[in-house]
Amino acid sequence: MSTVEKRCDCGESRWTKCAHPWYMKQFRRKYEPNLTRYAREVLARREWQNTKTEAEALAEQIRQAIREGTYESAKTQRQTIAAAAPVIEPGRTLSQIVALYDELRLTPDATKAKYGKDQDRGKLQCFCDTIVKGRRLGDRAMDTITMDDLIAFRSTLINRANSTWNKYRTVLGQLFRWAKWSGHIPTDPIATSSPDTVNLLRRKKAAQRRRRIDDLEWANLVEAARETRSENLAQILTALFETGCRSGEILALQWADVNLEQGQLYIRAEEVGASKTGHARQLDLSRPLYDLLVAMPRKDPAGQPLPRRAYVFGDPYGDRLGSIRKAFSTAVLRAHNIEPGWTEKGGFDAASRAALATIDLHVHDIRHEAACRWLESGWFDLAQISKRLGHTTIAQTATYLHAASGSIRQAQQGYDQQRTAARLAGKSPEFAGKSQANRQTALSTAMKPRLVKGRNALK
């Protein structure tokens, strides 16, 4: 018997798919918390996926806490946090509140990686440094920041991608909610504004990247990679294409993570640059990648065997490479018959940067191209591809691969080819066979007397 429920109008058959919150069914007459809110706000579970399984597990934990007398509701915990927070005198500036938010909420957050925290700090600093009506927002009192100021800040990012603004919007919402719950400001301007006003700050659908890499461009890119100073760039590109991994995951791969006997790789998702999801996964080796790993040397220049913790695609001594961005951009230019130009500081000159912008090829496009080819081959379904890519949900993978358009087109082409092959083999398609069967049935019944009901029935 289920111990959780939803209170939306979607109907019980849709509960597992709709995004509305789960509630615990009434327990001891007065306990029926909103489980989704409790998990995300009180327990700070960023990985919460709002599934029935998660809701039932959390409901069981809450019931056990109620039996033991240790349960505290979300409201009680917010009041506790507010009481424990330092008293803020009226007129404290936005910069001061942001510093407190960093100290009391952002830094202790164990569910967020250091890189993510640094990103949030940068966005909050950008918000504080914005000039509105001739004055820096960070120097103004926090309780004087209004929706007009937020809308003005949004206008300064109008040329940024939607995905960038979506991240800013999330961080700002978290800051103002915390400030309100902690008693630092009397009201949350986002929560108390009219829907039409809040709509001006809405998150917009991020643009989907559709850059593809054909066989000729890929061959030129690998050939150009062999000509760069980075000796193993071509090997890294091959590993990216064969696994669909992120570049940080490949650079973090150690020989201890490679099992050639079983033909598998283990992506640990632990190191900086390779821990975006925080969830490890295991991948099967393709034939080209297996042959590449077998042929790679396992000794340093002095002839000593590399340790198991040596990086597979590191330097000759097994140390990890920092980044392949510059080497990859050089290979991209040469793959398109453009010799890169350099500045005195070792960066690309203006002409090279303009050419790179025109070519518009990123390292991450290799991961996208690999996954698209898996889907188009017909050998992998979305669930398998999602697992290989390390995505959280299949819906994320479908959006990532534009499955609503590309896969349908591929399926239609395959269906047409199958019907053509059937005709050439002298076999009628299924729908033609059904029509023929219907015609034969009609002919066989035409010579038989027809049974009629009513006044015209045969007597």
Image (cartoon, helix red, strand yellow):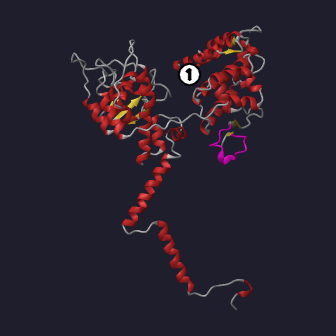
Does residue 262 appear in this view? no
State left or right for residue 51 relative to residue 195.
left
Which residue appears at 31% of the width and 22% of the height? 230
Which quadrant holds residue 325?
Answer: top left
Does residue 136 appear in this view? yes
Relative image position of residue 81 (x, y in whole percent):
70, 16
Relative image position of residue 358 (x, y in whole percent):
45, 30
Which quadrant holds residue 44?
Answer: top right
When the figure is inspected, residue 256 is found, relative to residue 346, above or below; the finding is below
Instruction: Name the residue furthest left.
Output: 303
When the figure is inspected, residue 16 is found, relative to residue 299, above or below; the finding is below
Relative image position of residue 167 (x, y in whole percent):
60, 26
Mark 1 falls on what kind of element?
A: loop
Which residue appears at 44% of the width and 30% of the height? 362
Instruction: Name the residue furthest bottom.
Output: 459
When the figure is inspected, residue 282 is found, relative to residue 310, above or below; the finding is below
Which residue appears at 38% of the width and 32% of the height? 240
Relative image position of residue 375 (x, y in whole percent):
44, 44
Using the image as rendered, state which of residue 226 and residue 109 is in the foreground: 226
Q: Is residue 14 magenta?
A: yes
Where the C terminus falls, by quadrant?
bottom right
The magenta region covers 5-20
When the figure is inspected, residue 118 is found, relative to residue 27, above or below; the finding is above
User: Few, some or many C-alpha atoms within 10 Å of disc 1 (few <14, some 14-19, many ≥20)?
Assistant: some
Using the image as rendered, state which of residue 55 and residue 218 is in the foreground: 218
Where the N terminus falls, by quadrant?
top right
Reading the image, the residue beneath label 1 is 112
Instruction: Name the residue furthest front.
Output: 351
Q: Is residue 200 magenta?
A: no
Which quadrant holds residue 335?
Answer: top left
